[in-house]
Image (tube, helix red, strand yellow):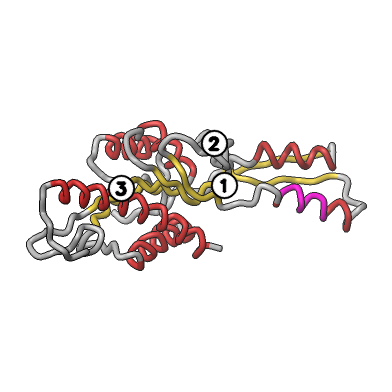
Amino acid sequence: MKKKLWLSLALAATMVVGAACGATGDKAGEGGSSSGGSGGAEGTGAGQEQKTYTISISQYLSHPSLDATRDGFLAALKDGGFVEGENLKIDENNAQDDSTNNLSIAQKIAGSKSDLVLAIATPSAQAVVQKVKDRPVLFAAVTDPVDAKIIGSMDKPGGNVTGAADTNPEATVRLMDFVAEHFPNVKKSALLSTRANRTRSSCRKTRRKRWPSTVSSWWRPPLPIRPK
């Protein structure tokens, strides 16, 4: 599942960068060059320099799953021929679970000249989408991009934003149906969640349809320890 998510995002990035390469190649062709060779994305003929593309990454905090999303994205790009240090530059930013840093990163990226932006986790995607309007934005590790107002709908995201959600919209309903069917004596349910979890509201509504008596609790994980 994670590999499919990484490949989907990398494919989107490759298509965007590849389209830019094609546009550059068309402009070069208009200059009257009639060399018969058909090189790669940049027409890698003799004397032509390979263009380097820049991807800005905004990651909300360091976490194994988020780090794996970033690493998988870069690995899939490499498989597609975009290699950091050769024809790819990565502008990597980590907010370290700080909302002020997160907004500053989005503002910094908006003022940069990167070709594409990858936002990892819901808070990063929300900030980037608000600030970056002039280039493609991809999101990953986002549970409900519609509820978080990152995109308008899953079928038609619209604008300059697309990406991959890491949850199945039917999962919560099916889980509640399973519990109600196989555990008929259950009269009350509880939901333990982080305060920032965007699916808390939808989960609560689904549970209350099955069990009117519900208990909700949330917690905020401690900030990661940073070396001095």
Q: Is residue 87 magenta?
A: no
Q: Looking at the rendered structure, which numbered label has been put on residue 143?
A: 1
- Amino acid tagged 3: Ser
Mark 3: give few (<14), some (14-19) or many (20+) Cα within 10 Å: many
Label 1 – label 2 distance at C-alpha: 9 Å
Label 3 – label 1 distance at C-alpha: 21 Å
Predominant SS along the magenta part: helix
From the top left corner, tell me how far across and down residue 16 is, in percent.
35, 49
- Amino acid tagged 2: Ala
Mark 2: give few (<14), some (14-19) or many (20+) Cα within 10 Å: some
Residue at position x 36%, y 35% in the image:
103
- Amino acid tagged 1: Thr
Q: Which residue is mark 2?
A: 148
From the top left corner, tell me how far across and down residue 56 is, in percent.
30, 48
Up/down of 40 relative to 196, above or below: below
Q: Is residue 177 magenta?
A: yes
- Answer left or right for 95 relative to 179: left
Q: Are marks 1 and 2 in contact (CB under 8 Å)?
A: yes
